[in-house]
Amino acid sequence: MARLKTAVLISGRGSNMLALAEAARDPAYPAEIALVLSNRPAAAGLDSARALGIEALAIAHKEYPDRAAFDRAVSAALKARGIELVALAGFMRILTPGFIADWRGRMLNIHPSLLPKYPGLDTHARAIAAGDREAGCTVHVVTEELDDGPIVAQARVPLEPSDTAQTLAARVLVAEHGLYPQALALHAQALLTSGNRGQEPSPTPSPRA
Ligand code: GRF
């Protein structure tokens, strides 16, 4: 069965990366995690990936003169390995238009809010301050706008009156670990079904979980 060669880009602990790697252990899963890449060499997720036998690569953004040079180095590393699909999972970098164009239709991100609510940082505190009764997370296709782009899937969790940003983040993170593997599979399967393994952008399905 065909599987898309997938890279997971991280900056830190990598718990979503681990959820994806766990799902991809099933040979029937339509993506294989071929690479974990971090812009921070000290990211804990790199060690976790290595422990699973997944190639783990650090490309330190601080060693590049500007964003575009760093993004070119990352794109080149992905292409050199035949990567066909990119999953951003806590990758704390603003991406340049050139990088986004390279991976158009083939790059997903997970964001800890019910987009279009609360793009950017501090999503949990903002949801609490707004008096929301529910929160959640979103997997979307990456476009030029930060935390925007066609939604692949969302998961909702209740927001309790006693919640702090920390307790809410923990509850949303559990939902993220369930959502991202499902959403990545949906998107990978759509690319495989359309016969698009990387060269041309393809329409993106937008079911909501
Ligand atoms: C997650 O909450 C993700 O939604 C956000 O950053 C966090 C990354 O956590 N973009 P982890 O590194 O996957 O554990």
Image (spheres, rainbow, N blue to C red):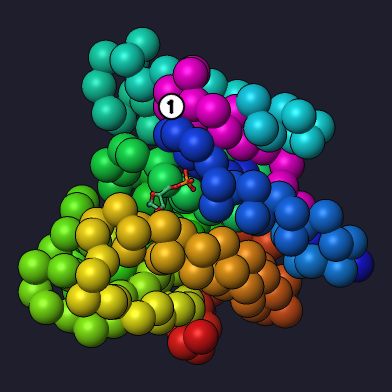
Left or right: where 100 falls relative to 163: right
Q: Give the percent coordinates (x, y) of residue 49.
A: 68, 34
Q: Give the percent coordinates (x, y) of residue 81.
A: 70, 35
Quadrant (top left, top right, bottom left, bottom right) of the N terminus: bottom right
Residue 82 showing in the rendered view:
no
Left or right: where 11 falls relative to 24: left
Circle 1 SS class: loop
Q: Residue type at mark 1?
A: Asn
Picture layout, residue 180 above or below residue 45? below
Q: Is residue 44 magenta?
A: yes
Q: Nearer the viewer, residue 117 or 206?
A: 117
- Region of the chain picked out in magenta, as a range: 32-46
Q: Is residue 117 magenta?
A: no
- The residue located at (51%, 85%) in the rendering is 209
Q: Say which residue label 1 marks.
A: 39
Left or right: where 141 falls relative to 199: left
Residue 52 showing in the rendered view:
yes
- The residue located at (55%, 47%) in the rendering is 15
